[in-house]
Image: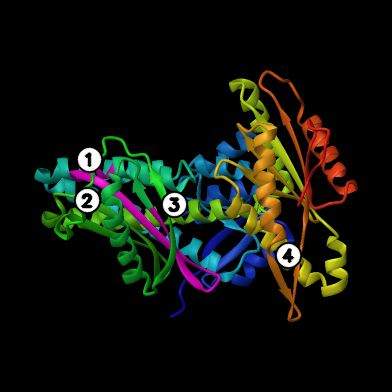
């Protein structure tokens, strides 16, 4: 017996998006791509609802009244497709209107994941309905069931209001307190990066430093056990938790581990520290499991959105910030400089005779040099500094709270590090030098960003014309040459 088909409605999708959806939807799903008026009529005629796929560009152009009429159909689930890079997508997802965000190009895995989450949401509401029936039949369970429903409602609502993974976890820590005596909530998420498994650990910012190593080891062991791969690298992110209790070393009988899974394989886990861990009943275990299913969707959306945003802000070759991100950050730092009356310097770097590298060794060697210089910048500069690729073989670095003379010392260290690095191509070793220009602004100075850039460029031009492989400052007339 063939399974009945279920409606999938496309709201004025482009032919390309409609084609991608139709190509990857299962046979039990039939896409109907309709105009706004036709879609509203279609949704009104169906009481059981279905799925609606809407592109970011289409949703952005809808009038507020049209949006309200669409989402008034409560039995329909809305999927947002990021057909363009638009910061407003974060706001749309935070409204709670959309179940998930899918990035282009669409593929079978993304669509299957979205359909699975839609099924799980439907199942969740079915579970809630059945629980409500039980409450009416068993009055003695009324208080507990109401608490569970309130917990799920609050957890799901707040999880859909942000795409920041740290905020999602901090919010769910407060929500879990509705069910349990919660001491701490920690998280671990893993993914494959360049052939090896790397993890991100979320630890409370109030966790005593002496106990962090034990928690890190425990979370890494959770990742290795659930992910079935040894973690080769990790980073730690801080969670700002309210009413966080002092962290204690992991005691297994006081830990609740909730795997977060999309599809068949887990990609993360929550670890809840609670004195109630060893005495949970089946009802609370079931609610926690349901909560984990839907937190998995929220966390995956948050992690994917952060990854997409990082790709948009970073240069694909060197893995440092790109020109657009630099322009935004420079204006932010200029405003901060004027507000706090701090020093601010800008470093502009140009690799000497870079064209000869491409001509001699090929463009792949040139790309390799740019990648390695990006790594040198990240490894040599301070945490507060902001490096970016300005274009071609040029790099820029924003140096907050730094005078020109201090910037010159840092630039000399950077120039020296680049100059002594050996690069290899075609079984040959070669070195590259860099010319660096520095410009700074003093406290109280109302210097526009364009002037700071121009002064740094002028200093760089002076370094190039005076022999290259040196650092020049806009405020210092004599050339600071390399020895």
Q: Residue at x 11, y 43 (%)?
A: 139
Label 3 or label 4, whichever lies nearer to me, is 4
Q: CA distance from mark 2 to mark 1?
A: 10 Å
Q: CA distance from mark 4 to mark 2?
A: 48 Å
Label 1 or label 4, whichever lies nearer to me, is 4
Label located before the other in sequence (1 or 4):
1
Give the total of numbered labels. 4
Q: Indicate how the structure is coloured in the image.
A: rainbow
Which residue in the structure is indicated by mark 4? 369
Which label sits on residue 245?
A: 1
Q: Residue at x 30, y 61 (%)?
A: 217
Which residue in the structure is indicated by mark 2? 273
Label located before the other in sequence (3 or 4):
3
User: Which SS class for mark 3?
Assistant: helix
Image quarter for residue 473?
Answer: top right
Which label sits on residue 298?
A: 3
Report if residue 26 lies within the magenta region. no
Give coordinates of residue 397: x percent, y percent: 69, 44
345 sits to left or right of 72: right
């Amino acid at each position: 017996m063939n399974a009945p088909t279920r409606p999938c409605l496309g709201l004025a999708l482009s032919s390309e998006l409609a084609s991608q959806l139709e190509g990857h939807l299962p046979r039990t799903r039939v896409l109907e791509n309709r105009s706004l008026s036709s879609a509203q009529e279609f949704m009104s005629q169906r009481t059981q609802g279905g799925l609606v796929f809407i592109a970011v560009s289409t949703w952005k152009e809808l009038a507020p009244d049209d949006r309200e009429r669409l989402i008034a159909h409560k039995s329909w689930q809305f999927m947002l497709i990021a057909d363009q890079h638009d910061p407003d997508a974060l706001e749309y997802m935070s409204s709670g209107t959309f179940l998930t965000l899918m990035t282009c190009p669409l593929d079978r895995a993304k669509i299957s994941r979205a359909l699975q989450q839609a099924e799980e949401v439907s199942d969740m509401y079915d579970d809630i309905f059945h629980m409500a029936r039980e409450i009416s039949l068993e009055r003695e369970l009324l208080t507990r069931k109401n608490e569970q429903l309130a917990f799920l409602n609050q957890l799901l609502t707040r999880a859909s209001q942000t795409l920041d993974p740290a905020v999602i976890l901090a919010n769910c820590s407060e929500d879990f307190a509705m069910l349990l005596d919660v001491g701490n909530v920690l998280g671990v998420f893993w993914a494959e990066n360049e052939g090896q498994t790397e993890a991100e650990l979320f630890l409370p910012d109030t966790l005593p430093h002496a106990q962090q190593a034990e928690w890190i080891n425990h979370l890494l062991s959770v990742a290795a056990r659930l992910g079935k791969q040894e973690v080769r690298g990790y980073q730690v992110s801080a969670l700002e938790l309210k009413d966080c209790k002092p962290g204690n070393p992991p005691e297994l009988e006081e830990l609740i581990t909730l795997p977060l899974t999309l599809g068949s394989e887990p990609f993360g886990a929550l670890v809840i520290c609670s004195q109630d861990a060893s005495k949970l009943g089946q009802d609370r275990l079931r609610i926690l499991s349901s909560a984990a299913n839907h937190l998995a969707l929220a966390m995956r959306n948050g992690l994917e959105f952060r990854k997409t945003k990082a790709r948009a802000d970073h240069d694909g070759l060197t893995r440092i910030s790109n020109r657009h991100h630099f322009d935004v950050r420079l204006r932010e730092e200029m405003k901060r400089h004027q507000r706090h009356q701090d020093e601010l310097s800008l470093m502009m770097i140009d690799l000497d005779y870079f064209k000869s590298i491409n001509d001699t060794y090929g463009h792949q060697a040139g790309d390799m040099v740019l990648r390695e210089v990006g790594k040198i910048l990240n490894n040599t500069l301070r945490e507060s500094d902001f490096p970016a690729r300005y274009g071609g073989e040029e790099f820029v670095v924003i140096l907050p709270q730094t005078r020109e003379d201090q910037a010159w010392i840092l630039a000399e260290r950077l120039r020296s590090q680049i100059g002594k690095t050996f690069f290899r191509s075609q079984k040959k070793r070669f070195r590259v030098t860099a010319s660096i220009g520095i410009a700074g602004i003093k406290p109280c100075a109302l210097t526009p960003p364009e002037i700071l850039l121009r002064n740094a460029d002028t200093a760089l031009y002076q370094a190039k014309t005076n022999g290259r492989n040196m650092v020049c400052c806009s405020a210092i007339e004599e050339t600071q040459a390399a020895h």
